[in-house]
């Protein structure tokens, strides 16, 4: 099996990846709004590293592979990851505007 199934845990990870991007990009962007390239590259590198960690966990840790990211996995765990993703996205995005 390759990749991750499209389930609630995957959507939760998408929120976590977006939160990581926002917490890095917005503070750097609002320091100098006329220059977006460097903040975008730095935030993109952070986003790439979060995606890499997710992929490594998916293939290296059996709980992630069999319970959370599997197509017929544990729906309760998937819902928890989804809720954590939404909470992190909301909190980190709000915090990025406060910095």
Image (cartoon, helix red, strand yellow):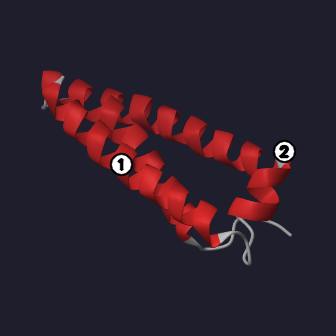
Q: Label 2 belongs to which residue? A: 60
Residue name at image x 59 percent, y 66 percent: 76
Q: Is residue 75 left or right of residue 2?
A: left
Mark 1, residues whose alpha carbon is within 10 Å: few (<14), some, or many (≥20)? some
Residue farthest bottom in this picture: 72
Identify whether 2 is placed above or below 41. Answer: below
Q: Look at the numbered disc 2 and give the secondary structure of its residue.
A: helix
Give the mark nearer the N terminus: 1 vs 2: 2
Q: Is residue 15 left or right of residue 25?
A: right
Q: Quadrant of the N terminus?
A: bottom right
Residue name at image x 66 percent, y 39 percent: 53
Q: Label 1 belongs to which residue? A: 87
Residue name at image x 72 percent, y 76 percent: 71
Whether tag 1 and tag 2 are in contact, CB under 8 A, the answer is no
Q: Position of residue 39 (x, y in %)?
A: 32, 29
Identify whether 89 is placed above or below 8. Answer: above
Circle number at residue 95: none
Q: Is residue 6 left or right of residue 55?
A: left
Splitting the image into 4 quarters, where does residue 50 fall?
Answer: top right
**Front residue of 10 and 83:** 83
**Front residue of 72 and 2:** 72
Residue name at image x 49 percent, y 40 percent: 47
């Amino acid at each position: 099996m390759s990749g991750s199934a499209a389930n609630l845990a995957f959507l939760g990870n998408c929120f976590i990846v977006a939160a990581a991007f926002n917490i890095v990009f917005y503070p750097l962007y609002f320091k100098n709004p006329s220059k977006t390239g460097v903040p975008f590259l730095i935030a993109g590198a952070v986003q790439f590293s979060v995606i890499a960690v997710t992929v490594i966990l998916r293939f290296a840790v059996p709980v992630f592979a069999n319970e959370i990211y599997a197509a017929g996995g544990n729906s309760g765990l998937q819902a928890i990851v989804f809720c954590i993703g939404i909470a992190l996205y909301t909190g980190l995005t709000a915090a990025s505007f406060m910095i």
